[in-house]
Image: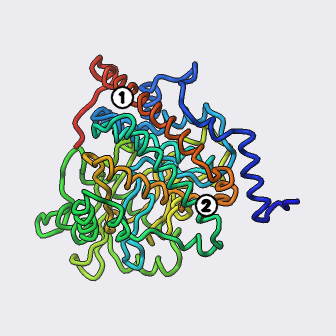
């Protein structure tokens, strides 16, 4: 008899999920009869965003199917929710496309590779993240001119790497799993033709510090250091915003641990600006704050970003956190092997939720455009294995490994789904472009 809570009992729980949702059932994708128009979904999302920035969002999303997929988290969440799911719950990234993995510095200043976007994080079925990753790989492959067979293979290898890593993690102890991380230097053996490009990415990431940002994002005006004016992407905070930021800075401080509050107190507030970030996030209120430590040659840039209800929440049971900023921060702490020491959250004017983090801390991302089939497969494997590490920290890795099994049934099924969803993404992207051409929504350049 397999006792619940034991490894054998947990594995049986995973195998039982196969009876509810067979692994082969993840294959393919057919839009539900009541599927909402993707442009209508985006417009509904934009109702409470800054209206003057929405054209930038549509402009960025219209640039390619992969850019559309990046911004259309709400569209894909509804599509995934229309399918049966395993019920094997983890802390989802919620937006696990292949460009939301990347490099960042640990508090010990080691360069790590991990999931790096958490705006949509929420507890849910593990396969939703896996499917979004696989779909993004298929879309990227198609954009790079790879054949359908090669796109299918790349998506499948992301899933295979996830399955292999989850099996390995299922055999490990709890602390061993919790402390497991992917060192950035381990990326180099994974690539063939693109080794120089990876080395260049690592070098650039190590240079992306607050001191480097000081030279790029600021200038001296009348003898005072100020964030540059580059409208509409970077604009100085007005008097009301500046007053509000100074107030919520104090509230944010209270969410840090005591030793980190002491560190933060050694910096003084210098300047702040509104900044446009990302693709799907455009229109949310986002600011950067320049702080000075010992002197202005010792800068610290923090980012304050508005947190909203996750796109997953309307499709899943209520989560444990009411405050959206806290949801993002706790989700990041669960998913990442090690975290930004300045992560915190608070409520701002009109009760809006925000979270704070370091703006630049040796961060870098892969250049997926132009990757060869071999290099895209290698990168897909890296992302798949990394996602398994993230899920194993919060979910039942033994049950998930048992559900996935030793055969490649799940891998092939999700690769089939990824190819079908990539085709739908291309169609949805065309729908957005048609809406822009017809004047239904307005798009503007947003480089």
Q: Say left or right for 208 vs 406.
A: left
For the C terminus, the quadrant is top left
Vertical arrangement, residue 348 with respect to residue 268, above or below: above
Res 376 seen here: yes
Q: Earlier in the sequence, mark 1 or mark 2?
A: 2
Q: Please provide percent x and percent y for residue 204.
A: 23, 65
Count the numbered circles shown. Answer: 2
Q: Nearer the viewer, residue 110 or 199?
A: 199
Q: Which mark is residue 167?
A: 2
The residue tagged 1 is 429
Helix, strand or loop status at disc 2: helix
Which residue is pictured at 38% across the width and 47% down the height?
A: 285
Helix, strand or loop status at disc 1: helix
Q: Residues within 10 Å of mark 2 (few under 14, many from 20)?
A: many
Which circle, 1 or 2, is nearer the viewer? 2
Res 53 seen here: no
Cβ–Cβ under 8 Å for marks 1 and 2 = no
Which residue is pictured at 47% across the width and 77% down the height?
A: 260
Q: Please provide percent x and percent y for residue 102.
A: 37, 59
Q: Residues within 10 Å of mark 1 (few under 14, many from 20)?
A: many
Q: Residue furthest right?
A: 1
**Which quarter of the figure has residue 20?**
top right
For the N terminus, the quadrant is bottom right
Q: Please provide percent x and percent y for residue 208.
A: 26, 67
Q: Nearer the viewer, residue 406 or 201?
A: 406
Which residue is pictured at 50% across the width and 35% down the height?
A: 416
């Amino acid at each position: 008899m397999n006792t619940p809570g034991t490894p054998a009992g947990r594995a049986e729980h995973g195998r039982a999920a196969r009876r509810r949702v067979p692994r082969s059932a993840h294959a393919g994708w057919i839009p539900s009869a009541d599927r909402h128009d993707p442009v209508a979904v985006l417009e509904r999302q934009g109702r409470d965003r800054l209206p003057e920035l929405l054209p930038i969002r549509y402009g960025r999303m219209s640039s390619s199917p992969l850019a559309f997929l990046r911004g259309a988290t709400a569209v894909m969440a509804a599509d995934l929710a229309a399918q049966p799911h395993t019920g094997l719950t983890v802390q989802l990234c919620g937006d696990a496309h292949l460009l939301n993995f990347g490099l960042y510095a640990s508090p010990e200043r080691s360069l790590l590779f991990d999931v790096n976007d958490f705006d949509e994080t929420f507890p849910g079925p593990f396969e939703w993240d896996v499917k979004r990753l696989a779909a993004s790989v298929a879309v990227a492959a198609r954009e790079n001119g790879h054949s359908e067979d090669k796109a299918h293979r790349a998506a499948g290898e992301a899933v295979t790497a996830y399955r292999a890593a989850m099996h390995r993690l299922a055999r490990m102890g709890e602390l061993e799993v919790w402390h497991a991380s992917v060192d950035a230097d381990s990326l180099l053996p994974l690539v063939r033709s693109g080794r120089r490009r990876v080395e260049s990415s690592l070098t650039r990431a190590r240079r992306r510090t607050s001191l480097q940002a000081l030279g790029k994002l600021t200038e001296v005006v009348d003898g005072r250091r100020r964030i540059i004016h580059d409208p509409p992407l970077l604009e100085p905070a007005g008097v009301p915003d500046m007053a509000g930021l100074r107030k919520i800075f104090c509230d944010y401080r209270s969410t840090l641990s005591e030793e980190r509050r002491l560190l933060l107190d050694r910096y003084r507030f210098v300047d702040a600006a509104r900044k446009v970030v990302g693709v799907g996030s455009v229109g949310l209120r986002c600011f950067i704050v320049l702080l000075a430590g010992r002197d202005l040659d010792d800068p610290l840039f923090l980012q304050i970003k508005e947190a909203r209800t996750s796109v997953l929440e309307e499709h899943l049971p209520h989560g444990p956190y009411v405050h959206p900023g806290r949801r993002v921060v706790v989700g990041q702490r669960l998913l990442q092997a090690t975290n930004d020491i300045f992560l915190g959250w608070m409520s701002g004017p009109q009760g809006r939720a925000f979270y704070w983090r370091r703006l630049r801390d040796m961060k870098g991302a892969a250049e997926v455009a132009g990757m060869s089939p071999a290099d895209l497969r290698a990168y897909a494997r890296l992302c798949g294995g990394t996602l398994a590490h993230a899920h194993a920290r919060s979910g039942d890795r033994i049950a998930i490994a048992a559900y996935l099994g030793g055969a490649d049934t799940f891998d092939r099924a999700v690769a089939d789904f990824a190819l079908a969803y990539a085709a739908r993404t291309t169609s949805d992207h065309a729908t957005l472009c048609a809406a822009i051409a017809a004047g239904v929504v307005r798009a503007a350049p947003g480089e």
